[in-house]
Amino acid sequence: MREISYEEALSLPDPVFVDVRAPVEYRADHIPGAISMPVFDDGERALVGTLYMTHGEEAAILKGTEIAGSKLAGMVADISRMGKRDIVIGCFRGGMRSTTLVSLLDSLGLRVYKLRGGYREYRQYIRRRVEALDIAPALYVLHGLTGAGKTRILRKIANALDLEAMAGHRSSLFGALGLSPNTQKMFESLLVERVDAVRELPYVVVEGESRKIGDIHIPRPLLERMARAPGVLVRAPIERRVRNLLDEYPRDADPGRVRAIVRSLENRTGPRVSRELERLFERGELEEFARLLLEKYYDPLYSYSLDRMTFVAEIENADTDDAVRQLLGIVMPGEIF
């Protein structure tokens, strides 16, 4: 049986990672792009774990073998259809789930590897990378008031490091509405993958963030690099900022969640503004709701820090495509866009 580390697997000509852990494990974190092919579903995993605790290892192995045996033929058929790619199979720590499947596939002559140490060793690799994270290209940071369209600009640039997309969160009090935020571990997996993907590029653009995006902590080495990087200020008239917010956030968000967030702002906005925001939301007057939120909460919150920053350039974002052209002219002077 051939075993391979995650780093070694990356050098294979055409690797495909197959994750045989349970869905709950896969959702928490996985190798980006890995195919989920669970040996146990969540309930079966819990059952085997309970048997191990109550009746010992032998009982758990027997039940696990019984469950896996009914699925192996289908899994082998699915993997066989992947053709001549280099198939790397991993479970949590390189134990029975991956060993059983790799042994069977290997006996059938397929080009297959067991991921050495499984997900646990992969996670250790990611932690080492995050602790010493290095952005090789020149880095530029977009700053601006809420709704200025920074994220829209970022998502039209190939050389982007989109931290909010990796977090599954818009980095605001309302940022999780309509989204499924990622775990810290999944964020770090996606971040390392993207840092490697942009390593040979001449420049990378990222949106300015605080220490956290929702519940996600941005690694210290990246925060420090962003703090040293040249900043570009994005400006937009308030009418456009209101429209950007209305386009970005779901209109069918859970009313209870929205009301709870609005009420949590009272210490900063005062009770009168908080009540007015709630009234506008209840009446469906969303443009007025967004404008008041900008004027009474977000702008006072961020204007002070922006006023203290220095920027290498400013962009007027009346149109996203034009703003992208302005930005490219800053990061790649002399080029025609």
Image (cartoon, rainbow, N blue to C red):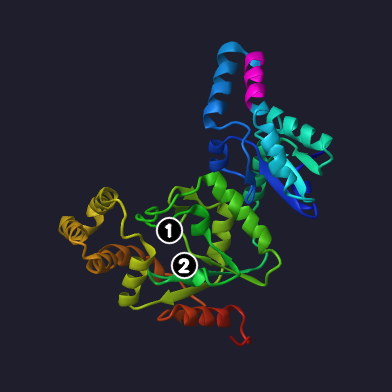
Residue 97 visible in the displayed image: yes
Residues under labels 1 and 2: Cα distance?
A: 9 Å
In this rendering, would 207 be left or right of 116? Answer: left
In this rendering, would 18 be left or right of 183? Answer: right
Could you say which is closer to the camera, residue 113 or residue 44? 44
| Start-end of magenta stretch | 58-67
* Residue marked by disc 1: 170
Q: Residues within 10 Å of mark 2 (few under 14, many from 20)?
A: some
First-in-chain label (1 vs 2): 2
Give the quadrant of the N terminus. Answer: top right
Q: Residues within 10 Å of mark 1 (few under 14, many from 20)?
A: many
**Kind of residue sitting beneath label 2:** Thr
Q: Is residue 59 magenta?
A: yes
Residue at position x 63%, y 86% in the image: 335
In this rendering, would 276 be left or right of 79? Answer: left
- Give the main secondary structure, helix, strand or loop, of the magenta stretch: helix
Query: Residue 265: x and y, percent?
Result: 26, 54
**Kind of residue sitting beneath label 1:** Arg
Query: Residue 100: x and y, percent?
Result: 74, 30
Query: Residue 301: x and y, percent?
Result: 33, 62
Q: Mark 1 near mark 2, Cβ–Cβ under 8 Å?
A: yes
Place residue 87 in its image quadrant. Answer: top right
* Residue marked by disc 2: 151
Give the quadrant of the C terminus. Answer: bottom right
- The local secondary structure at tag 2 comes to helix
Q: In the rendered picture of this protein, how many numbered marks are placed on residues? A: 2
Could you say which is closer to the camera, residue 46 or residue 144? 46
The vertical placement of 188 against 335, above or below, is: above
Residue 143 visible in the displayed image: no
The vertical placement of 155 against 128, above or below, is: below
Residue at position x 34%, y 78% in the image: 237
